[in-house]
Image (cartoon, rainbow, N blue to C red):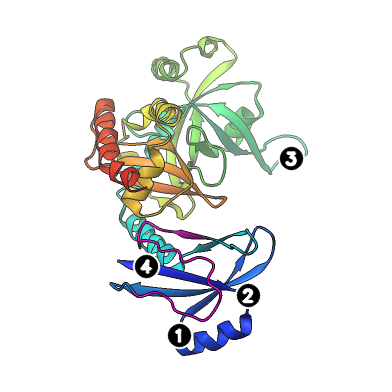
Amino acid sequence: SDHLATTTTRRTTRRCMMLRSCGRKVVTLRTTGGAAYHACLLVRRNTNSTCNTNTNTNTIATVSRGMACRARAKSEEAGEEVEVEDAQVRKEEEASFEKHQSKAERLTFAQEGRTLLDIGTFGVISTMSARGKSRGFPNGSIVGYAAREDTGLPIFAFSTLSSHTHDIDADPRFSLTVTAPGFRGASDARVTITGTAYKVTDEEKKTDLKRHYKAKHPNAFWVDFGDFAMYEATELVGVRLVGGFARAGSIKAEEFMNAEVDDIVQYSEAICGHMNDDHNEQIPLYVKFYTGMSVDSAKMVSVDSLGMNVEASKKGQRFKVRLPYPEPAKDRKGVKDQIVAMSRASAVVADQQ
């Protein structure tokens, strides 16, 4: 294995002269007291040699490649602590992480977009304002909806008093944006569909749409009131999915309507809540074992039939990590089985730390 030997000195001039002859790498260290030290880094492969210099050696730290990210040295003279990060290890971690993430199995854009719309119950509808000083300008409202099982297109129950109802009656064009459960910001998933919607007047069809709407909104008794009307999207022009940083794209209308809903996503909140509350120490180990990247902390944010999405933190920076299961899960028990398998596999990381 590779090893890292560090030797500290206060004498910059002498250090530079020696490094010219031995070709070693120089880094500057900051101590807890603010003093500047210099380190001579020597990467040795399969050798027991040490870094021999004529300087006052305070500490020599030997660290195994792959497991060590930092070497700590203490100055006997000043009693101050210094810290070095092995740049080579960091680069290897980053390369391993990027390679893993580029090949990590995910739901297709169409599947993820269709699933987000299916499990959602509320969204932001944008219409073209038909009244007042804002006429002709976009108008946004939070509305309830239910996605059709056959096409995924939304069904609405609008009050005749709402501004967006008047807007739709005057101009059927709309867009609806739905966010993933637990949405907090730009790194979380959302989907926007654009199309046209019309008021339903056929009594038999209205009854069917109300039944479907109540299945998603059990307490929506008010849909039977006389001042509420049923609307349905009849045309889908486009779909835009943003799955978080570095994952965004458009989905063709036909692909969206033909995509299958992932049945596992509905269990995300319960599964992630359990793991984050009772087994949170396991999740950073998953990240390390499967991606090669060490992280300070991690938590599960969602699951699907193919894997889990994790939010990790390293040195104050937060980022998303995709971790596929060893095998796809067909039901909720299948997810549990896959997580248990991941815990057993990643236990080797804990044993090495």
Q: Which residue is mark 2?
A: 10
Residue 222: percent from left, percent from top: 55, 11
> Callout 3 environment at 10 Å: few (<14), some (14 to 19), or many (20+)?
few
Q: Which residue is mark 4?
A: 3
Q: Secondary structure at mark 2?
A: loop
Q: Earlier in the sequence, mark 4 or mark 2?
A: 4
Is mark 3 in CB contact (under 8 Å) with mark 2?
A: no
| Circle count | 4
Q: CA distance from mark 1 to mark 4?
A: 16 Å
Residue 5: percent from left, percent from top: 43, 70
Q: Which residues are magenta?
A: 49-72
Q: CA distance from mark 4 to mark 2?
A: 23 Å
Q: Which residue is mark 3?
A: 134
Occupied quadrant, residue 113 = top left
Q: Earlier in the sequence, mark 3 or mark 4?
A: 4
Residue 10: percent from left, percent from top: 63, 75
Q: Secondary structure at mark 1?
A: loop
Task: Find residue 331 and name its label.
Answer: none
Mark whose residue sits in front, 3 or 2: 2
Q: CA distance from mark 3 to mark 4?
A: 68 Å
Q: Which residue is mark 1?
A: 23
Q: Is residue 220 magenta?
A: no
Task: Give the residue type that dot 1 points to.
Answer: Gly
Q: CA distance from mark 1 to mark 3?
A: 70 Å
Residue 22: percent from left, percent from top: 44, 86
Q: CA distance from mark 3 to mark 2?
A: 70 Å
